Image (cartoon, helix red, strand yellow):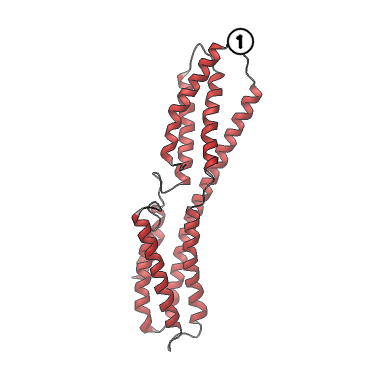
Amino acid sequence: MTFTPITALILFPAIVLLLQLGRRLRGSRAEVTHSSAIEGAVFALFGLLLAFTFSGAVSRYDEHRKLIVQEANDIGTAYLRLDLLPAASQPALRQLFRQYTDIRTHRFDELPDAPQSIQAANQTDALQAQIWTQSITAANQPGAHADATKLLLPALNSMIDITSTRKNAFNMHPPDVIYLLLFLLSGGCAFMAGYGMNPATPNWLYTFALALTVTLTVYTTLEVEFPRRGLIRLTTQNQVFTDLAKSMN
């Protein structure tokens, strides 16, 4: 099961219904008492799970932003070290770098199975192979700096390695069972809260406030966790690539 931000919207009607179901059940069994200790334990567990899930999502989102800057820096470092190659070999490689930077700028704008993402991934691999091959050839030609191989190739290696790091970061999420448990606890807490309400006078303000609060919190958590599946995008962080591309012209 794939959880997306839109999935969280089903919580609102579900919580409202479960609150009323709990309240009605309590009304038909007015003589039954409820345990505050059990309620407190369940609500505390739900709060901890929600807090840790949200915190983890924000942490991974921040990691995405750091990796964007790191990749741009790696590309910029490798680009500058092209100066170590023979002058005749530099124009073709610099053009390849410009193409590569443009592709990497929008590499993660779409979902992994989108045609644009697949095409960008294939172009990335092809350009990496061309840049690597031409750089090795140029570094061993007359006119290359004595340390061209020692300085340029490690920079290219870092530029290539960061692409795998970013790809893995986008695919690194908590197991689906965590989100399933989050949804189940949301419903369970709503039912218990309704069971503790006064069955004679339902408070719709509290009902909608709880449903809206939980729904928005879970929705925001999923938005941050899956930045390509909802309204949140990382495209606003791509300015560092745009600035890098301008410096290459």
Residue at image position (43%, 69%) is 76
Residue 84 visible in the shown view: no
Where is 211 relative to 247, above or below?
A: above
Residue 159 horizontal/vertical position (percent): 47, 68
Residue at image x 66%, y 24%? Answer: 37
Q: Residue at x 41, y 38 (%)?
A: 6
| Quarter of the figure with residue 133 | bottom left
Q: Give 144 or 23, whichever is nearer the viewer.
A: 23
Q: Secondary structure at mark 1?
A: loop
In the foreground, 21 or 90? 21
Q: Is residue 29 visible?
A: yes
Give the image location of residue 209, x and y in percent.
47, 26
Q: Nearer the viewer, residue 192 or 80?
A: 192
Q: How many labels were placed on the picture?
A: 1
Counting other residues with Cα less than 10 Å from the Cα at mark 1, is it few (<14), some (14-19), or many (20 or more)? Answer: few
**What kind of residue is marked 1?**
Glu
